[in-house]
Image (spheres, rainbow, N blue to C red):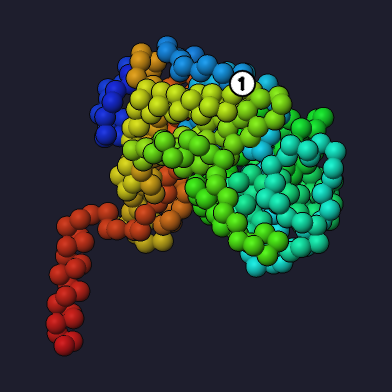
Amino acid sequence: MTSSFVSVFAPRAAEEPIHSTLQPLCPRILVCLGRSTACLLLAALFAALLCPTAAWALSDQPTVNEAQAWCVTDETGAILASASEDELFAPASITKVLTACVALDKGVSPDTVITIPQMPEEGWEAAQRAGYAPGTTATFKDLLAVMLVYSANDAAYAIAEYVGGSQAGFAQMMNEKAQQIGMTNSTFKNPHGLEEEGHLTCARDLCLLGRYALTRYPLIAKWVHTPQVTVPVNGQDLTFSSTDELMGTYKPLIGIKTGKVEAGCTFLGAARKNNVTLYTCVLGCATSDGRFRDTRNLMEWAFATYKNMAVTRAGQTIQTNPFAFRFGYEVPVSSPMTTRAMIWPDDVACSYTRTLTSSSQLLSSQATCGVEQWRQGDRIVAATSFETDWPRPSFRPYRWTFDWAAHAVARKAA
């Protein structure tokens, strides 16, 4: 048997878990389900917890002056605010983040020596380059560094040629990776982001890419937060500065990538403050400075507006179940980690839906037995699972008697 609880609360800033400090505004609803139905519900709800949700109406919006499309999400992928987030734009050099993901997935050794291929002439007149001469060599780690720090298009071209065998072959790998990440509204035609017909994505997808790259690829996280890098180019050590001008002026920033084409300036950003990580994307900005101003406004608005609140506490027992393999023992059920949510402090009610195995069900230890999803209005703000802990005696005096007897036997044996 599985139980499903639905409770609704008024939002309140607090460090304690919400459902231990707030009073329900409506009665709790309890639904008991058969085992097969419960399994289906658990699977469906858990799948829903993993999906980013759409933006919802806010009482106050951030100041955005230049971006034609923008998006700000939290570390779970939930959209906190957005405008035209699904409208297609040229991503420019933000493309190089996906290029790095694809290349690293292939397992290329950092010290692999790559021969620089002949670069195309058409469309590359104003392209930013590190200056590698065709036929010279560079290591994969140096090409990756100068591509992400300085946004060198020749480095991206060389990486793609080596990993994909051709630019077209690598573009196919990029699109496959984009689908894997969940970037369903994106199409990539090249590895560097220079303007090309059909090379388009959206702010929602790029925020997803930023979160994916920073949380899964330590090398990417390192280079997108590096002010400058020195690498050998054509036998001479050259120092390249980051194109991310916000890095030196906004302390919470942790990356990740700039972009600039005729269609507009772009920036995919990430920032961490007070243990909260945010991801932003601005597209179609008129000026380079404008993209950074809009990004900073989005981040500061989100940090100031949303409250980071604990909704579950690691190890906090919510029920106990009889242990399946020893009579007289029980297993406590709790969340394995403290779960926090970004809550908007207005009159929009918070609610949680908990689907949990019945407390009478026999369970083993370390078994997943439920999930919980938190919402504010229509927006999913947090999700967690519940697991059983190690078994303990159900009747505590019995446990003390058992311990005393065990110690007595040990002393006699000694």
- 139 sits to left or right of 215: right
Q: Name the residue nearer the viewer: 120 or 368.
A: 120
**Residue found farthest to the front:** 236
Q: Residues within 10 Å of mark 1 (few under 14, many from 20)?
A: some
Q: Which residue is pictured at 23% across the width and 54% down the height?
A: 395
Q: Is residue 387 left or right of residue 207?
A: left
Expressed as whole percent of the image width and height from the top left, the position of residue 313 reads: 32, 42
Q: Nearer the viewer, residue 181 or 119?
A: 119
Number of disc labels: 1
Residue 109 percent coordinates (x, y): 66, 66
> Can I make out residue 177 in this image?
no
Residue 158 can be seen in this image: yes
User: Horizontal and vertical percent for residue 263?
Assistant: 71, 24
Residue under label 1: 286
Quadrant for residue 93, please give it: top right
Please give the name of the residue rendered at 64% of the width and 62% of the height, measured from the top-left corner: 236
Q: Position of residue 200 (x, y in %)?
A: 74, 30
Left or right of 366? Residue 399 is left
Residue in the image at 41% along x and 61% along y: 325
Q: Secondary structure at mark 1?
A: loop
Q: Quadrant of residue 22?
A: top left
Which part of the image, by quadrant, shows the C terminus? bottom left
Seen in the picture, residue 303 relative to 108 is either above or below; the reply is above
Which amino acid does the dot numbered 1 rest on? Ala
Give the residue drawn at x 84%, y 53%: 118
Q: Nearer the viewer, residue 81 or 257?
A: 257
